[in-house]
Image: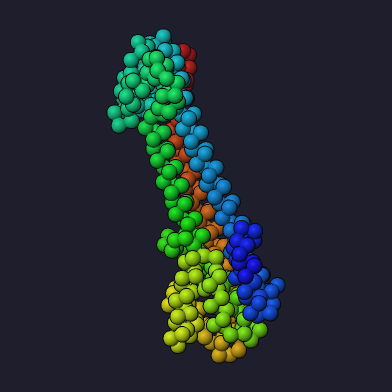
Amino acid sequence: QAVRQSRQSLPPESAMAAALGHDTGDLAAALEATTYASQFERSWLQPAISRLVYLLAMLMAFNVVVMYLRVRILPSYVRIFDDFDQRLPDATIAFISQVPTPRGQWQVSNPMLALPEFVLDWLTFNYPGPLLIALVSFGWLSVLTVGSVLIVLALLLYAWLQWRGTLMPRLPVLRKVITWVDMGPILRGVALAARHNRPLVGVLVAMARLHPKRTVRRRLRRVVRDLDNGIPWYDGLRRQRLIDRNDAVLLAAAGSSGNLAWALTETAAGFERRATYRLQALAQTFLPLLVLPVGLLTALIAVAYFLPLVDLVIHLS
């Protein structure tokens, strides 16, 4: 009870571990059985989140560089090419959407990406306006960047709430990972009770009462209610989609042959391995997909802003 009341001082699974240790008489094994979720979170989720935040920050900085090139470098290009009676390359004109003329006007080349002329005047300081407006008027590219960042952050927050147990896991790939990570400590706790010949019902009741995740507590309470109605505990876990049919058959056979503790431990280890492999595959697929658009946009900018120099050198030679 003291551990349960010390919520901010100890890990969230400490109360459940203390209850399992009290019921089974093996506190050390109970602590070891219930700490996998925290270890998994520290070793995988935190680095993945930090990398994602880094990519988002890099995207915002990239957008600032693009706007600087458009506002400061491009007018210099226009003046230089006008002095040599040259026209900017079509690739540059198509990418920048609006070309400043030497007379201080703006020629629209791509209406879909065009900015209002007064915004461009503020950005280039051709029109007296507050500096704050010049800083926040980034254009449609910034609007798209901020919108995409907000969408990714909202999706990240939604996934994090599912991971913490505030919301029921519903994302297709992450749902399996969360279930496997949650089931590791649960199966190890049941294995600890079976190893010490303790009633499994008491362990399930303790975990349904003290598990740190609200969604897991709710599903375990349904399993306990099924136990009260005469349904075997492994069928109750299967009915709540915590384990599949093959796992339920394996646990039923292991209980009949007297190898339940071993089967529970191996099943928990299999869940943990699958969660690790699935998250590895997700990270190796998702992070490159975020970097790829930035790389393609960098290539387009390189072509748009360096091709005029090549054309100018060829013309002068």
Residue 36 visible in image: no
> Which percent across, then down, holds residue 251?
53, 82
Identify which residue, 141 or 146, lies in the foreground: 146
> Could you tell me how many numbered marks the image carries?
0
> Which percent across, then down, holds residue 188?
60, 75
Question: Compared to 264, does 117 lie above or below?
Answer: above
In the image: residue 84, left or right of residue 40: left
Q: Residue visible at 44% across and 61% down?
A: 167
Question: Compared to 126, does 192 lie above or below?
Answer: below
In the image: residue 68, left or right of residue 17: left
> Which percent across, then down, holds residue 98?
35, 23
Question: Compared to 276, does 80 lie above or below?
Answer: above
In the image: residue 248, left or right of residue 97: right
> Which percent across, then down, holds residue 240?
44, 74
Q: Residue visible at 55% across and 90% down?
A: 256
Residue 63 visible in image: yes
Location of the N terminus by quadrant is: bottom right
Identify which residue, 215 or 111, lies in the foreground: 215
Identify which residue, 222 or 282, lies in the foreground: 222
Identify which residue, 46 or 165, lies in the foreground: 165
Q: Residue visible at 60% across and 89% down?
A: 258
Question: Compared to 150, does 125 lie above or below?
Answer: above
